[in-house]
Amino acid sequence: MNFKVSDLVELLNTEYSFYLQEDWDNSGFQIGNYEDEVGGILLALDLTVDSINYAIQNNINCILTHHPLFFEKIQNLQVNSDLYKKLELLMQNNVNVISIHTPLDIHPNGVNKFLADKCFLSNKEVFIDYKEGYGYGIIGSIENDTFKNYLAKLKNSFKFPMLYYGNTDNIISKIAVLGGSGAFSIKNAISKKADLLISSDFKYHDIQLALENNLKIIDLGHYESEIFGLLSLKEFFINKNINLKILIYENNIFKRNIF
């Protein structure tokens, strides 16, 4: 029996409940043909010309992204624009695109579950309530440790550079993690008496607010904090015995470079 794009959309919708997505989100089927047989799945945070070409080179006709292809209202489409180039490349090569954004953010085994595991958290619970028992981020604990020692453990766990703010001699134990842009959650972390918030995309005054309230900050980078969501998707497909080529595209243009 052929596994069609429509079957893939239904499978994802059954597990990740697209109806739970935020009003501003656009998760779900983006472009392609529901009747196409799925010839492999590429998991990517973002749809770029490079990621599309990577799928084509690997004979994959379905890309599953975290960030939607169509997010903001399209008012025009210039032939030299990146969006036009992407759409042209997708249509010329019969590549389908599905996106799963906030449903993956709030899923119990999604972005934040894997992030919390990488941060060694125990006693985990939802950080910020959303609806129907779902929520954003995870708050948990570690055994009392200095911020300095914990940073060393994270460096070994993540294998990439990170920014941090706060006194490294202080003892920490209660930690909140939130994949993606987490500045909005600073007040939540303060109210829940977290010692540390691990997320991304903090501005100067966000950090000031946190530090003035004894909340330390680690900025992993947006890409770096969400890449684990792709691992959770691959694990989901494996557990569902989806016998297809499934690759993860990690050469993202937004990956942080430090010199």
Image (cartoon, rainbow, N blue to C red):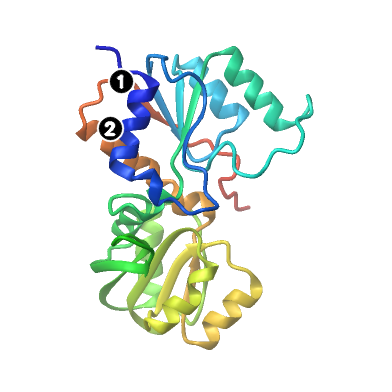
Q: Secondary structure at mark 2?
A: helix
User: Mark 2, residues whose alpha carbon is within 10 Å: few (<14), some, or many (≥20)?
Assistant: some
Task: Give the residue displayed 37% in from the left and 55% down from the top.
Answer: 106
Look at mark 1 in the image and give the residue it sits on.
244
Picture coordinates of residue 47, whole percent (x, y): 56, 34
User: What residue is shown at x 70% (from left), y 38% (from top)?
Assistant: 74
Figure quadrant of the N terminus: top left
Relative image position of residue 100 (x, y in whole percent): 43, 41
Image coordinates for residue 192, horizontal then vertical, percent: 37, 81
- Residue type at mark 1 is Leu
Report which residue position mark 2 lands on. Answer: 237
- The residue at the point 44 percent across, 46 percent down is 227
Q: Decide which of tag 2 and tag 1 comes sooner along the chain.
A: 2
Q: Nearer the viewer, residue 24 or 98?
A: 24
Q: Residues within 10 Å of mark 1 (few under 14, many from 20)?
A: some
Q: Is residue 188 left or right of residue 31?
A: left
Q: Are the residues tagged 2 and 1 within 8 Å (C-beta)? A: yes
Residue 212 drawn above or below residue 14:
below
Vertical placement of 124 versus 62: above or below?
below
Name the amino acid, label 2.
Phe
- In this rendering, the answer to whether 243 lies above or below 191 is above
